[in-house]
Image: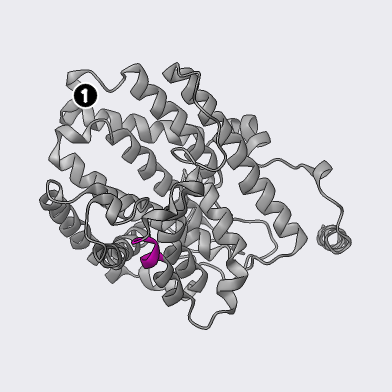
């Protein structure tokens, strides 16, 4: 769902680089993190039709939703540090974020009209549906990156914006701005992180401490399941829209950020740093993210989750395994080749040729030929 950095070599404990070297290798740690996070996203979506029958599953759902999108957003921010208004980067923002958003927002609207047999279903590019909100948010966050880079204290400013959004029901649903603003601190945090911060959470003591952290989170989520509205985890509504006093909005923004950071650090500590069988799939997480939504929504409509035997532990385990396997398949190279036109279009015909970009391309080719 975002570009992984590269590293000049693979060690037993590889370190996230400060900037991508030019040898073309991707960094295994971040690709592994992206793949494992997208598997958790798919599993969480497959639990939605089942979790009402199981308090344990509802607790697992809450724990996963507390950190899987924050982890994605933090990595997105980390790899947006070099973004500026250079023409080639703006071009990539358009082809890698805007075009997929337009195509999939339209595709989901047509799909919903077909599945629900509702001819009146509108196609709206201003009201993201289901999964496309992330692309809309990523566009806004990345476009504002130069602003965050010049601020002296960007994270407190991002928190202030998120807290104000949480008490502003008038924001409405256009561009899913509630999520854009309430998730903003995670992106800005990613912009502020350095390689040494990832090295800190990947130390052995942190990996050991992650076990009781997740255990305590599951116990707390089990206790909170009948007492807390899970919609707080989605960050898509203000406090007033959730039926809470206005002051709960800022409190929940800070409380959920603290919980999310603790679980995200624990998650990163368990992500392997070496190349695994699934490492290459990390390059295709945008494909898995956007495509698996069609499968989940169609399955709900078609009654795949209705059989009674699926609403017990064996059925829940089977659904979880199928969801993980399904999103894994959607991240593979054959699927990426088929859908590359929508996810990574070249679109050279749509852009002017920039002289500086052409010069950089010639220099890259010259270096490649010299190295050969």
At 83% from the left edge and 42% from the top edge, which residue is drawn?
349
Q: Where does residue 13 sit, x and y in percent of width and height?
A: 44, 65
Q: Quadrant of the C terminus?
A: bottom right
At 43% from the left edge and 73% from the top edge, which residue is drawn?
197
Residue that numbered label 1 is attached to: 310
Figure quadrant of residue 209: bottom left
Q: Magenta: predominant secondary structure element?
A: helix
Q: Where does residue 57 sit, x and y in percent of width and height?
A: 19, 40
Q: Nearer the viewer, residue 164 or 275?
A: 164
Name the residue furthest front: 170
First to last magenta residue range = 162-167
Figure quadrant of residue 309: top left
From the viewer's perspective, is residue 50 above or below residue 240? Answer: above
Name the residue furthest bottom: 152
Image side of residue 273 versus residue 354, left or right: left
At 48% from the left edge and 63% from the top edge, which residue is drawn?
187
Q: Nearer the viewer, residue 52 or 264?
A: 52
At 45% from the left edge and 63% from the top edge, which residue is drawn?
184
- Residue 1 appears in the picture as rendered: no
From the viewer's perspective, is residue 318 above or below residue 87? Answer: above
Image side of residue 365 versus residue 213, left or right: right
């Amino acid at each position: 769902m975002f570009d992984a950095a590269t590293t000049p070599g693979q060690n037993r404990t590889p370190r996230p680089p400060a900037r991508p070297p030019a040898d073309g290798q991707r960094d295994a740690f971040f690709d592994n993190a992206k793949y494992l996070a997208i598997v958790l996203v798919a599993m969480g979506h497959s639990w939605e039709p089942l979790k009402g029958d199981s308090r344990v599953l509802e607790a697992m759902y809450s724990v996963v939703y507390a950190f899987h999108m924050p982890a994605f957003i933090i990595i997105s921010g980390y790899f947006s540090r070099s973004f500026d208004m250079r023409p080639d980067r703006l071009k990539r923002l358009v082809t890698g974020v805007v075009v997929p958003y337009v195509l999939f927002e339209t595709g989901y609207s047509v799909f919903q009209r077909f599945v629900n047999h509702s001819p009146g279903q509108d196609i709206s590019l201003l009201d993201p549906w289901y999964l496309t909100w992330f692309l809309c948010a990523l566009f806004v966050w990345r476009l504002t990156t130069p602003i965050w880079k010049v601020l002296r204290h960007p994270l407190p400013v991002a928190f202030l914006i998120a807290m104000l959004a949480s008490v502003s029901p008038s924001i409405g649903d256009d561009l899913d701005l509630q999520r854009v603003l309430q998730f903003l601190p995670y992106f800005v945090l990613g912009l502020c992180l350095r390689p040494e911060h990832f090295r800190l959470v990947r130390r052995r003591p942190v990996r050991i401490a992650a076990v009781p952290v997740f255990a305590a989170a599951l116990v707390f989520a089990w206790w909170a399941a009948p007492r807390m509205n899970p919609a707080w985890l989605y960050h898509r509504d203000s406090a007033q829209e959730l039926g809470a006093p206005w002051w709960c909005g800022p409190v929940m923004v800070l409380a959920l950020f603290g919980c999310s950071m603790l679980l995200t650090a624990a998650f990163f500590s368990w992500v392997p740093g070496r190349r695994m069988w699934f490492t290459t799939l990390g390059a295709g997480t945008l494909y898995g993210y956007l495509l698996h939504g069609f499968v989940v929504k169609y399955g709900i409509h078609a009654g795949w989750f209705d059989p009674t035997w699926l609403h017990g532990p064996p059925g829940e385990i089977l659904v979880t395994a199928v969801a993980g396997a399904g999103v894994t398949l959607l991240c593979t190279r054959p699927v990426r080749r088929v859908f590359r036109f929508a996810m990574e279009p070249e679109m050279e015909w749509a852009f002017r040729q920039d002289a500086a970009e052409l010069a950089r391309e010639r220099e890259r080719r010259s270096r490649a030929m010299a190295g050969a």
